[in-house]
Structure formats: C-alpha cells, structure tokens
C-alpha cells in the first residue's frame, strides 16, 4: 500500500456511507466523522510538505509538566482526585522519556504521603477517606517514581494498613467496593488486584477468593464486560475485568473468549481509526487505552498458531492517525500540547495520559516470535516507550516494584521465623 493510502481509503468509506436511519446518535456520529475527516484531508493535501505524522513531544512535555506544578480553576472539581493528576502527568512524562529530578520526586512523594490514610490506602487528597481508585493511582505513581533505585517512593506505603483497607472493601461474593460502603464494580476489583500484585501480598489467593467467579458473571451476551453481572458492556469495565483476571492468573474463567475478541475488534472505528467506549458511541482518545490496552492481554489467550505475528488484532497505524492528526490540541495552526477526546474538545490530563498510553500499548507487538515496533518513523520521537498493559506503567517500573516488595516480604518472613 502506498504511503497514506490507508487514510485515503478511510476518507472513501466516509464519503460512501449513508446511515439507513437518522437519529441523534447518527447525527453526532456523522458530525464527529466530518471533523476527523477534514483533518485527514488537510494532511493528505499537504503530503508534499509534511510527509509523516508527527507527535509534538516538546509541547506535550511542557503541558504535562504544568500538571505537576499549578492547575487552573477548571481542575477545582478534581480536588478528590489529586493522586490521579499525579499519575496522569508523571506517566505521560515517563512515556515521553522525561526523567524527573530527585528533588521533584521527593516533592511528589511528600504530597502522596499526605494523601495516605491512617486506616490504610490513599484518599483523593490530604485527610480524605481512602478510596480504591486513588489508591491505584497513587501506587502507579509510586511505581514510576521508585523505578531505577529511588526507594524513598516505595517507603511511603504502609503495606499492613493498605492490606487491611483492601479487606475492608472486599465483599463476600468476591467483588470489591470502591470505598467502605461505596459502589461495587469491576473497576474496584482491578484497582485492588493491581495494588495487591504490586505489593506482592502474601495471601493474595485468600484476598481474591471467588473474585474470578464474580468477574466471569460480568461478561455480557455480546462479549464485552459490564461493571456488574447483567450490565451493559463497556470499554473501561472490559479492560478492568480482563486485566484483573490476568493479574490473578485466572483468565481461564472467561466464559467466551471469541465473543470478547469480536466485541473488542468492533470498537475500532472504520473511518476515525480510534476506539469508542461501547456500541453507538463516539470515538474518544481515552479508549486508546481502555480498549487498546486489552489487545495485548487477549493476544495471550489466542491459539498462538493462528494469532498474528507482527500486529495485535487491531490497526495500530489507524489509531496513530487518529491520535496524532485529530487529538493533539492545536492553537493557531500549531500543536499546543496535550490531547483531547476528539477534535473540537478541550485538552486535559486524563485524555493526555490515556491517549499516549494506548498508543504506547499498541506500538510495540511482543510475542514468542520477538518484538515488532509499529511507528510511522521508528527512530523518531513518534515512538513511545513500551508499557506493561496490566498496570499501565513501564515494564521496568513493574519489575522494580515487584522486586522491592517481594524482598520486603522475605525480610518480614525471616523476622517472623527468628521471633517464633
Ligand atoms: Zn474520554
């Protein structure tokens, strides 16, 4: 295929598709498609000048760095999500190969310490109640900061208390609630599984007793997973269910792998190239990861003789077309830094983190045949760092945090033996 013929092919699909019925959903879909297609067409028209897609790394670094210093009034409503902002920005910077100074890391650690509850787990800010989502975000930030020998980050965690917090939100049917007396869904299970695995908890089997049975019941008739048994399939809950099962080594509990694969593949938009969150919804760059992150996980569940060798079961290039051409926020014809969900929306740190995470997850294909990198220009800065798709931090950060907490567990065991 000649360079960018794939873009031209998608422009043709848009031109030749007319909905059978007209509803509010079809109108929003065609308006969104129209905006994306205009950006694709603009790029195709300028191929003589700019021949390749470009990720404006410098601008994104500048935007993400601001999230670690001061935030505008628009972020006031996220006062209960401050560890999330720390994770979204540190992770985006990590994917863009930024190494934070030890002073900056210490400053962030001091803030996360204030968010840790005396009852275990992390709240949304200092003195707020512990919550599984912010505990997950804080632990991911700690994994990023601690990687490469900055143990000060790992030392923040009160492991015993955090374990008690996890038991305090466990339900008898194997599910978890987001906080004490909070809502139960597969997000909570994933956050608990990710945190417990990072901490290498000794009694993980006991903590997650019956969890696989609960998750299996969340697979819907169409193959995706909902937040609870019987609920509608959704990208976020499909990722959290699948990643939780993989973290617990229980993917064999998935009732129907082929319908899951079909549901996931159908989430990639034929014109835009990005993913939607569920059927009949608009493309959105945060699903780069919430849908895209599931592909490396399902790949491992396929019969490897029939699994593709140098791609995932989705179109990584199409995702990059959407992300680089339609989601990098622009001001006066140049990239301003940061990503939006779709053209015309404002940028934010959440979409910046997950737009980049999904591209990182799908740019690198790895299996028993080796590793293939799918980048417009493999040696350029368009190519992001690899991630571990189960935790959404770099593989080395996962190895380092596993090593640290398993060594701590060994020390504790020896101490127990010497005292008995
Ligand atoms: Zn979104």
Image: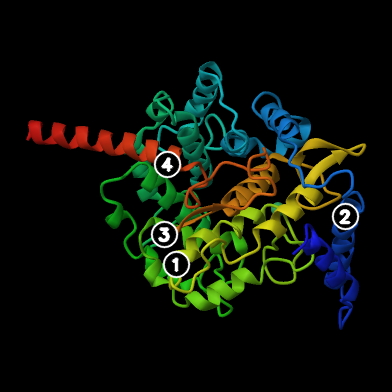
The label on residue 121 is none
Does 289 appear above or below 215? Answer: above
Ranked by sequence position, the earlier of labels 1 and 4 is 1
Q: Quick one: 118 or 112, which is closer to the camera?
A: 112
- Give the residue pinned by disc 1: 215
Contact, mark 1 vs mark 2 (Cβ under 8 Å): no
- Give the residue pinned by disc 3: 368
Residue 107 spot, x, y in % from top left? 54, 20
- Give the residue pinned by disc 4: 398
What is the C-alpha distance between the residues marked 1 and 4?
Answer: 24 Å
Contact, mark 1 vs mark 3 (Cβ under 8 Å): no
Q: Is residue 22 left or right of residue 274?
A: right
- Give the residue pinned by disc 2: 44
Tell me the SS state at disc 4: helix
Ranked by sequence position, the earlier of labels 3 and 4 is 3
Tell me the SS state at disc 3: loop
Tell me the SS state at disc 2: helix
């Amino acid at each position: 295929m000649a360079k960018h013929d794939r873009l031209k092919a998608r422009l043709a699909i848009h031109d030749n598709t007319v909905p059978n019925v007209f509803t509010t959903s079809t109108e929003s879909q065609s308006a969104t498609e129209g905006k994306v297609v205009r950006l694709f067409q603009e790029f195709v028209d300028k191929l003589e000048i700019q021949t390749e897609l470009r990720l404006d790394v410098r601008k994104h670094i500048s935007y993400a760095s601001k999230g670690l210093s001061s935030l505008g009034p628009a972020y006031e409503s996220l006062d209960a999500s401050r560890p999330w902002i720390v994770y979204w920005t540190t992770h985006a910077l990590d994917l863009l190969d930024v190494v934070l100074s030890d002073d900056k890391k210490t400053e962030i650690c001091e803030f996360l310490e204030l968010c840790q509850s005396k009852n275990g787990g992390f709240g949304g800010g200092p003195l707020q109640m512990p919550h599984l989502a912010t505990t997950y975000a804080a632990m991911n930030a700690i994994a990023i900061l601690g990687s490469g020998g900055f143990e000060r980050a790992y030392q923040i965690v009160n492991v015993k208390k955090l374990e008690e917090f996890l038991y305090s939100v466990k339900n008898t049917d194997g599910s978890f609630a987001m906080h004490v007396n909070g809502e139960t869904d597969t997000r909570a299970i994933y956050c608990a599984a990710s945190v417990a695995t990072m901490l290498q908890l000794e009694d993980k089997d006991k903590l997650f007793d019956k969890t696989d049975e609960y998750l299996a019941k969340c697979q819907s008739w169409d193959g995706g997973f909902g937040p609870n048994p019987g609920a509608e399939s959704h990208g976020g809950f499909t990722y959290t269910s699948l990643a939780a099962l993989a973290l617990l080594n229980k993917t064999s509990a998935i009732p129907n792998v082929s319908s899951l694969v079909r549901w996931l593949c159908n989430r990639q938009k034929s014109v835009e190239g990005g993913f939607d969150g569920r059927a009949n919804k608009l493309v959105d760059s945060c699903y780069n990861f919430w849908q895209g992150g599931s592909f490396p996980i399902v790949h491992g569940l396929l019969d490897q003789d029939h699994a593709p060798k140098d791609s995932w079961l989705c179109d990584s290039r199409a995702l990059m077309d959407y992300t680089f051409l339609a989601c990098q926020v622009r001001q006066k014809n140049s990239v301003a830094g940061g990503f939006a969900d779709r053209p015309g929306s404002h940028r934010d740190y959440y979409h910046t983190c997950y737009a980049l995470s999904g591209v990182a997850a799908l740019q690198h294909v790895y299996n028993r045949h080796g590793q293939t990198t799918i980048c417009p220009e493999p040696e350029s800065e368009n190519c992001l760092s690899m991630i571990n798709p189960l935790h959404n931090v770099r593989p080395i950060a996962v190895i380092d945090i596993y090593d640290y907490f398993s060594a701590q567990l060994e020390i504790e065991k020896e101490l127990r033996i010497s005292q008995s």
